[in-house]
Structure formats: C-alpha cells, structure tokens
Image (spheres, grey):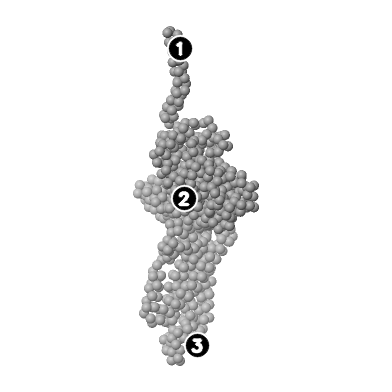
C-alpha cells in the first residue's frame, strides 16, 4: 500500500512537471503577446495594384493593406506600414529593419529557407500579356523576342524557366508600371505578371490582353524572417481565420473586384500618354530660366528625374502660378508643380502627391530699413505674390500688426516694390527669399520662419490618379538613389530647411550677397541678346498673324456696317460693341481657360493668343473700314451706278480702292496697338518680349536696366512702324491719283 502511494506521488509529480514545461511557456507567451504594446514595422511594395497602391487621396490601399488592417484590428496589435518596393521590402525583413512583409509574396520552397510564412491568404497565378494589336497569340510566337518581367517576382522566375523553351529573352524592371510601359513602347512584346495584378491593370485601360493559360498557381503569404516574430505569424493566422469567418475577408476582395484565385477586375497603371504639366514662371530656386534660356530649378529637375525613373513623357508649360492653377482646373494641364503648398482648402479641388519639400514663409525688408520686427510694420504696406502661402499669411496678420497689403503677380515685381520703397516688406516662401538674397537682392529677413508647409505635385481632384502614383513612386526612388539630394544641393537647399542662402541676417550671407557682381547695361543686352530677340520675334509674329486675320474679319464687319441691311449691320454693331468693351485680359483667360472647360477641348496658348488679339483687333478694324468707306464722297457711288455698275462692283472697283488709301494710317496705328497688346498674353504662358524681360529679371534681379532695355526695344520697333506709316501716307494718300 505504501509502495503504491509512493509510485502514485511520483507519477503525479512527473505529470505536473510535464504540464509546467509544456503548457506554462505557451500561457506565458500568449500573455506576453496579448499584453505587448510593440508597434511592428511591416514592409510592402509600392505599386502592385490591386494588392497595394495609393488611391486619389494619397492613402495606401489594396487587398494586402486592408487585410493587414483588418487582422491588426482583430488581434489588437499596432503596426507601421512602410512602402519600399518588393526587393527593398525583402531586404528590410532580412536585415531586421522590418518585422514582417506583405506584398503579394508567393510562398515557395526557396523562400521558405529564409522566411516563415503564414497560412496563405490568397491563391494567385501568373500570366503573359501582349498589346491588344499584337499578332502574338501564344507563347510559341515569342521566339526571338523580348519579354518584360518585374524583378524578384514569380513572373520573373517563370519567365527565366521558359526562356530557353520558347526562345525569348528577358528584360527586368523594378516595378510593374515600367514593365508594362516597356511593352507599350514596343521594346518588349510581352509582360509576365501575377494574374490578378495583370487583370486589374487591363481593366483600368492598359491596352494589353492575356495569352495562354494562367500558370504556376501560387499562394500569397505574410512573411517574417525565419525564427523571428513567431507571435506575428500566429496573430496573422488567427486574425485571418476570424475575418474569413465574419465575412470581412470577402468584403475586402469584393471591394477590389477580386475573387480568391481569380484575376482582379480593376487597377492603375502608367500609360503612353504625354502629360501637360503647368508651372510658375519666376519662382527661383524652384522654377526659373537660366542664362541659356532653359527652365531649371528644384521643381523642374525633380519632375524630370521622376519622369525618367517612371518612364512617362511630359510637356512643361510655364504659365505663372494663378494661370497654372486655372490650367489644371480647366483641363488644359494634367498636373501642376510650382512650389504649391498643400492646404486643406486646396485639397477640396486638387489631389496631391506625398510632399516633396518642406517649406516655410518669411518677411523681408531692405537691408538699411529700420524695421526689425513685425510690430514695426504698423501703418506700412507689405508686398505679396497672389495665390501664395505668403499672401494668405499676410492677410491673416494684417489686422494684428496694422499693415496693408499690395498684391503682385510674380516675385520679382513684389521684391521691386520693396526696393522702390512703395512697400516696407515682402512676404515669400523662405527658400525662395533666401535664394533671391543670395543672388544680390538687397533685403534681409526679419522674425522667424512661419507657416511651415509641405510642397506637393497636384492634379485635379479625381483626375490622373496614375500620375500621382507614378510621382510618388518616382520620388521614393530618386530619394533612395541619391538623385533627390543632388538636386537640392545644386540649388543650395536642404529638405525642410530654407535655402542655404536664406540665413541672410548673418554678416557672412550679407557679404556674399553684396559680392554678387551685377551686369552693366550693355552686359545685360549682350548676355540676354538671344532671349530678347526670340521674345521680340514672338511679339512681332503674334501681331502680324493677328492683324492679318483681324483685317480680313474687319473688312467683312465694315461692309456689314455699311451694307444698308439692318440685320447685317446690327450683327456687326453688337460684335464691335462687345469686343471693344471686353478687356483683353478677361478675353485671353476666357479663351484659354473658359472655353476648354466648357466644351472639353484643348487650345494651345499660341492659338488662344492669336484668337484673343484677332477678335479684339477685328472690332477696331471694322470701324476703320466703315470710316474709310464713309469718307468717300457719295457722288463716287452715284457716278459708278449711273455708269451701270452694280452695287458690289461699285464697292469693289470704286469705293474700296479709295477707302484703302484713307485707311492705311489707321491700319498702321492698329498694328502698333496690337503689337503692344501682345504683352498681356504672358498671363497664358506665351513668352513674348515683356514676359522675356520678367524671366530675365527673375534670374538677375536687375529690373531697372532690363525694363529700360525692353522699353527701348518697343520704342525702336514702334518708331519704325510709325515712320512706315508716315511714308505710306505721303506716298499713297496725300499724292493719290484719280481713278
């Protein structure tokens, strides 16, 4: 009996010890997991729709993103999502920079050597696709051709396995949009991609079609580094089971049009479209023209680098800030990059990319000014640039500090107003102000940098989401490869800081600014001669073409006014009254921005400029023709009719030849007026003579001598025209012969 009891106790103790060493650790582990407040870093891809991509609001969405969010909510753990790109995400997990990865990652035996996977959350496959117009119908037709793949994917692995069998070569890309673009551009004849991703892209307008059967069925899994973060795998599996049970999983797939194991039905991708991008004209160091007449600057260079990285084409239109905004709103431009601060108000109209620069706003006064702080601005005027963050800040502070606001269309004129003493201070984005001071502008900043605001690339709300996606992906890439830092260094600007020259209050910077050597009057002419001649050529071209059209239209209007027909005369009178009463600035805006928005068409700035000048000048030419006809003695008409000439013959052979001689001086005068009116067209991005002067001033900050040069050029060309008018008048009017 005693022996039995001892054995029972021994068995009991052994069982208890076993329970302790097997169950207790699990309980402890579960308790630790449940109570842990660790924030996990989860890596993902950048552009792998419909699994992960950015929507029109700049938010990361997709099947992977939503599944992860739902599981985290179900299992009550925190995470930070990092969009790195597929290869970078893999490396981040391997190096310990990320705790896990969800990026449409196929579970393979090879990957299992490095990673622990969860139970599969999606069953995928791989497909080949070619252009809609391609003659290729099967993989056999790929012999001797190139196939595009995305590095590190199941598609790349499949293509490598089949390359020898079907005789094609492989071109490798870092992301899906560039892979697709290679096919669209004709460099590769086919692309290989996960079937749901390919299907999503095609449904969004990518002009490809799949060939052959879906191949290499493979499950997608959430991955962690082998032996690390087992609690994350456990929570993902438990959460996945729960969201499948409660229907959340099916809702996510339905949201993106994807049934498990099937292709998706919606997506975003790059296209071969050439985008029109609007920008400012004079906003150094973000956009301005260099001495060679080329547009350069932080914005310009960043856009060029991103376009090259993402493989899209664009045309840059320099319009001025306000005009650029209107161009995007009216559909004349697809996007805008112009040091545009991202604000809640602007988000009502535009979709922005992730910020590409962190700026701020500063006040500046003349170096020798007594103004030391904003309090000293009471009773004085402050110059601002319309539509900018500086203008908004000045409006907010005007009552508080008791100053009034003067508004200008561009930065150089704003600065000049301070230099001329009309305003006591200017308000501008800090890096722009700093750059201007570094170039010799005799101002100094006062107070602290205010209203920190990020700059973003903008598109019209709900339009061109692929452009937002490509900009974001490209920005991330050029930051990773160092191009972004090189661009900022080129213009002396550190991200989030003012320009290197912005600390103008220091004696060192002041000395540097003073050391900037300004060009003499004649150096201004010689250094900018090519640009000035080009601007003058554009001015004369616009004036001549517009006057030719206006003359033809004016003759018809004049004849209608003098026809004696009440209807024709009334139509001509209404047209003339409207055109003479409508300011050219309003008309140019309406033709370039209003008409395209109303009728969903596009009009080039040159065409809009010619139409503006022609329609306006035609009204005046019509009155000149009417006056010339009525200046001919009525007896001329009566004599011609008595000789048997018809009314039309009388007008053509008798009246008009005499009337033209009378009208010639007025024609020349109207040409002079039209020539000067071309300066208004700078508001819609035409770089004529006046706009050329503004662009040069934005680079040199020498407005006095440049405006003198521009004025002299106008005087010379107009004097020539005036002398021509005098000669014609003496030759053909005063000495006119009889018929």
Spatial separation of the CA atoms under disc 3 and disc 2: 78 Å
- Can you name the residue that lies furthest to the top here? 2
Q: Nearer the viewer, mark 1 or mark 3?
A: 1
Percent coordinates x, y for residue 367 in the rendering = 47, 48
Specify which label sits upstream in the sequence, 3 or 2: 2
- Mark 3, secondary structure of its residue: loop
Q: Which mark is residue 7?
A: 1
Residue 82 seen in render: no
- Report which quarter residue 481 is drawn in: top right
What residue do we see at 45% from left, 56% from top? 328
Q: Which mark is residue 193?
A: none
What residue do we see at 57% from left, 57% from top? 134
Q: Which residue is mark 2?
A: 266
In the rendered view, would you say 480 is above or below 282? above
Specify which label sits upstream in the sequence, 1 or 3: 1
Q: Which residue is mark 3?
A: 739
Percent coordinates x, y for residue 66 in the rendering = 44, 42
Residue 54 or residue 309, whichever sits in front: 54
């Amino acid at each position: 009996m005693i022996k039995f009891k001892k054995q029972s106790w021994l068995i009991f103790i052994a069982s208890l010890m076993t329970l302790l060493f097997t169950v207790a650790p699990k309980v402890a582990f579960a308790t630790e997991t449940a109570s842990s407040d660790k924030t996990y870093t989860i890596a993902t891809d950048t552009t792998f729709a419909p699994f992960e991509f950015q929507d029109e609001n700049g938010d990361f969405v997709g099947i992977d993103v939503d599944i992860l969010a739902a599981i985290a909510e179900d299992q009550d753990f925190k995470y930070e999502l990092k969009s790195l790109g597929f290869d970078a995400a893999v490396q981040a997990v391997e190096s310990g920079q990320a705790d896990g990865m969800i990026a449409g990652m196929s579970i393979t035996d090879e990957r299992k050597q490095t990673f622990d996977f969860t139970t599969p959350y999606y069953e995928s496959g791989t497909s080949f696709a070619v252009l809609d117009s391609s003659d290729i119908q099967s993989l056999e037709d790929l012999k001797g051709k190139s196939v595009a793949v995305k590095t590190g994917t199941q598609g790349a692995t499949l293509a490598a396995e089949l390359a020898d069998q079907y005789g094609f070569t492989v071109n490798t890309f870092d992301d899906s949009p560039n892979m697709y673009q290679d096919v669209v551009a004709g460099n590769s004849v086919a692309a290989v991609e996960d079937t749901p991703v390919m299907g999503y892209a095609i449904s969004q307008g990518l002009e490809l079609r799949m060939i052959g059967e879906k191949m290499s069925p493979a499950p997608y899994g959430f991955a962690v580094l082998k032996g690390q973060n087992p609690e994350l795998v456990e929570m993902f599996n438990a959460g996945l089971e729960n969201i499948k049970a409660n229907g959340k999983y099916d809702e996510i797939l339905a949201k993106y049009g994807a049934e498990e194991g099937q292709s998706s039905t919606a997506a975003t991708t790059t296209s071969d479209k050439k985008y029109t991008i609007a920008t400012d004209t004079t906003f150094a160091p973000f956009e301005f023209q260099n001495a060679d007449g080329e547009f350069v600057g932080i914005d310009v260079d960043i856009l060029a680098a991103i376009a090259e990285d993402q493989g899209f084409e664009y045309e840059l239109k320099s319009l001025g800030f306000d005009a650029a905004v209107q161009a995007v709103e009216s559909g004349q431009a697809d996007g805008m990059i112009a040091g545009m601060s991202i604000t809640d108000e602007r988000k009502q109209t535009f979709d922005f990319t992730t910020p590409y620069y962190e700026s701020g706003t500063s006040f500046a006064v003349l170096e020798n000014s007594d103004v030391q702080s904003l309090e000293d601005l009471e009773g004085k005027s402050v110059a601002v640039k319309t539509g900018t963050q500086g203008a908004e800040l000045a409006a907010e502070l005007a009552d508080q500090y008791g100053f009034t606001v003067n508004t200008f269309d561009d930065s150089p004129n704003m600065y000049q107003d301070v230099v001329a003493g009309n305003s006591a201070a200017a308000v501008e984005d800090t890096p722009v102000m700093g750059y201007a001071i570094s170039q010799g502008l005799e101002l100094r900043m006062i107070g602290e940098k205010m209203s920190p605001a990020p700059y973003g690339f903008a598109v019209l709300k709900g339009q061109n989401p692929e452009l937002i996606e490509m900009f974001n992906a490209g920005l991330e890439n050029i930051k990773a490869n160092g191009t972004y830092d090189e661009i900022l260094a080129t213009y002396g600007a550190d991200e989030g800081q003012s320009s290197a020259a912005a600390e103008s209050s220091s004696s060192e910077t002041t000395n540097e600014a003073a050391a900037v050597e300004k060009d003499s009057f004649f150096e201004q002419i010689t250094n900018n001669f090519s640009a000035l001649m080009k601007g003058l050529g554009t001015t004369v071209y616009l004036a001549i073409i517009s006057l030719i059209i206006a003359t033809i239209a004016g003759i018809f209007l004049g004849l209608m006014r003098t026809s004696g027909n009440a209807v024709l005369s009334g139509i001509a009178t209404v047209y003339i009254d409207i055109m003479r009463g409508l300011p050219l600035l309003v008309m140019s805006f309406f033709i370039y921005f209003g008409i395209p928005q109303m009728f969903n068409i596009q009009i080039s700035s040159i065409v809009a400029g010619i139409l503006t000048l022609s329609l306006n000048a035609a009204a005046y030419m019509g009155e000149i023709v009417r006056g010339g006809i009525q200046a001919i003695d009525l007896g001329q008409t009566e004599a011609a009719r008595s000789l048997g000439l018809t009314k039309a013959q009388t007008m053509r052979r008798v009246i008009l030849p005499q009337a033209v001689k009378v009208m010639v001086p007025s024609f020349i005068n109207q040409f002079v007026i039209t020539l000067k009116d071309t300066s208004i067209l700078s508001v819609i991005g035409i770089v004529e003579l006046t706009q050329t002067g503004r662009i040069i001033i934005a680079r040199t900050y020498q407005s006095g001598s440049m405006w003198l040069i521009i004025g002299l050029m106008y005087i010379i060309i107009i004097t020539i025209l005036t002398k021509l008018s005098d000669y014609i008048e003496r030759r053909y009017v005063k000495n006119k012969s009889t018929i």
